[in-house]
Image (cartoon, helix red, strand yellow):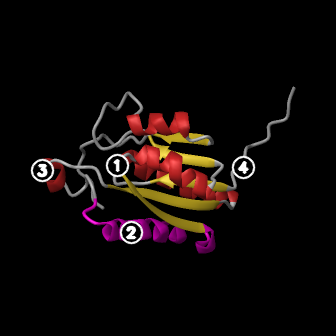
Amino acid sequence: MFEIKPKRFHKILVGVDDAPDARAAFCYAVDKAKRDGSELGIVSVYETNKTNVYQILDKDYVHSTREELQKRINEYVKAAIDYGVEASKITALVDQGERPAERICNHVIPEYQPDLLIIGSIGKWGNRKAVGSQASYMTKNAGTSVFVIRSNEMVGEDHQD
């Protein structure tokens, strides 16, 4: 027989956007950080790639400015504090680039140095039975433990913020 020793993480990084799976990942990360007394990094990437007219018209696709994204991250920070995570243990991170998964793996993780990355399974559009390309990339390239969270909310469902 062997002894079961639960793994405790000391520095958690969670990737957030407005996709249902990312919100579920955030909720899981906040609860885990509170239970373990971990530091919590909350990251979102301001996407600088070119978007088409339909994506621009969709308020959920990409935040229009970096400042707007920073305000959204601050809402996540407030939610974590309200849940009981110590404010001194929370770091808000906004990165910028064309490929969020690559930015997180190649820039944010080396700088923040988490021992756990928590991400949503898939973005707003995609097959619910598959892991999205962003999550797949980060799982392969993060260089740390990765939890991939899937929500029960279907992509495309109307939701209230």
Where 159 falls versus 138 (above or below)? below
- Image coords of residue 55 (percent x, y): 18, 49
Q: Amino acid at mark 4?
A: Arg
Residue labelled with disc 2 = 70
Secondary structure of residue under mark 1: loop
Closer mark to the observer between disc 4 and disc 2: 2
Q: Is residue 158 visible?
A: yes
Residue labelled with disc 3 = 53
CA separation in Å, label 3 and label 4 = 45 Å
Q: Are marks 2 and 1 in contact (CB under 8 Å)?
A: no
The residue shown at (41%, 52%) is 23
Give residue 114's mark.
none
The residue shown at (53%, 54%) is 108
| Dot 3 crowding, Cα within 10 Å, few <14, some 14–19, many 20+ | few
State yes or no: residue 86 in magenta.
yes
CA separation in Å, label 1 and label 4 = 33 Å
